[in-house]
Amino acid sequence: MKQIACVFLLVFAISPLMAAPLSISSPVQQATLIELYTSEGCYSCPPADQWLATLKSHKQLWTTYVPVAFHVDYWNYLGWRDPFAKAQYSERQRQYASHRYTKTVYTPGLFQNGREWRAWFSDRRLRSPVDNDVGVLQGAIDNNQLRVSFTPVHDLSAPLQLNVAVLGFDIMTEVSNGENEGKVLEHDFVALSLGHYQGQVLDNVYQWQIADASIDLNARHAKGIALWVSRVGDPTPIQAAGGWLR
């Protein structure tokens, strides 16, 4: 069967902290993108945040499991404005609802590879990924450039979108109002930014080149990065990978 090779080129301004080359790679088997939709204004969210933080020490972190915490903004009116909340994260969760992958938006809300993980509330054990070979997703940061490539096992016959999330770790917030008033909240895997990159197909090669990227790899708290590819118009990840920035 004909294969499609996908090649992405993103150019970043990287500080000396990023001088050493960084390589990221997924297995051929589909990795699991774990998405947590959370908010500092939600009283039931801290246990989910704490659970996600335990994945920092998981032996299959970044290969089999790629966690991302999206802070939504639809609870900001409750008296506390979440400093990490963004409207685009709320919209991403609503996209899942519009595709009928969930009936409604709520926090804490968890997804595994684009499918609602409601069973998390009764059983928080990670499941072994389904044996589904999709292709290798690779990324490399070197010489002020982020290069990402994805070669599907099967012909996808569709435009692909590259998604890049810079992740924050070891974050502590003293909440002075709202449902979590008086608490000190701790966060890891926080999406500090999320970029989407589309390209054109030339000779079965998908190519992206962004010379003036809006992603700040050296933002405060930035210590990790998550990459995943999806079809244009559908948030469901096809393959994911991640790694530590420093």
Image (cartoon, rainbow, N blue to C red):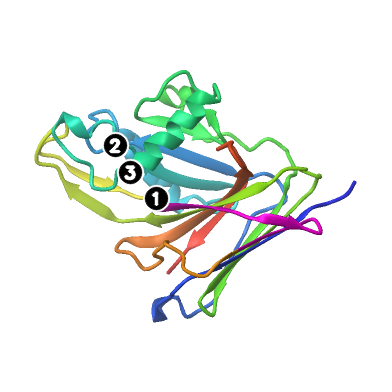
Q: Is residue 231 magenta?
A: no
Name which residue type carries label 3. Lys
In this view, 15 is above or below 5: below
Q: Earlier in the sequence, mark 1 or mark 2?
A: 2
Between marks 3 and 1 in the image, the one whose residue lies nearer the viewer:
3
Q: Is residue 199 magenta?
A: yes
CB contact under 8 Å: marks 3 and 2: yes
Residue denoted by label 3: 86
Measured from the top left, where is residue 234 in percent x and y? Answer: 59, 36
Range drawn in magenta: 189-208
Amino acid at circle 2:
Asp
- Tell me what residue is drawn at x 80 percent, y 55 percent: 204
Image quadrant in which the C terminus is located: bottom left
Front disc: 1 or 2: 2
Measure how far apart labels 3 and 2 are at the Cα level: 6 Å
Q: Give the residue at mark 2.
A: 73
* Element carrying mark 3: loop
The reply, left or right, for residue 107 in relation to residue 118 is left
- Read off the residue under disc 1: 189
Q: Are marks 3 and 1 in contact (CB under 8 Å)?
A: no
Marks 1 and 2 sit apart, C-alpha to C-alpha, by 17 Å
User: Badge 1, how many Cα within 10 Å: few under 14, some, many 20+?
Assistant: many
Q: Which numbered tag is attached to residue 113? A: none
Q: Quick check: 50 left or right of 7? A: left
Q: Quadrant of residue 176?
A: top left
Q: Nearer the viewer, residue 204 or 84?
A: 204
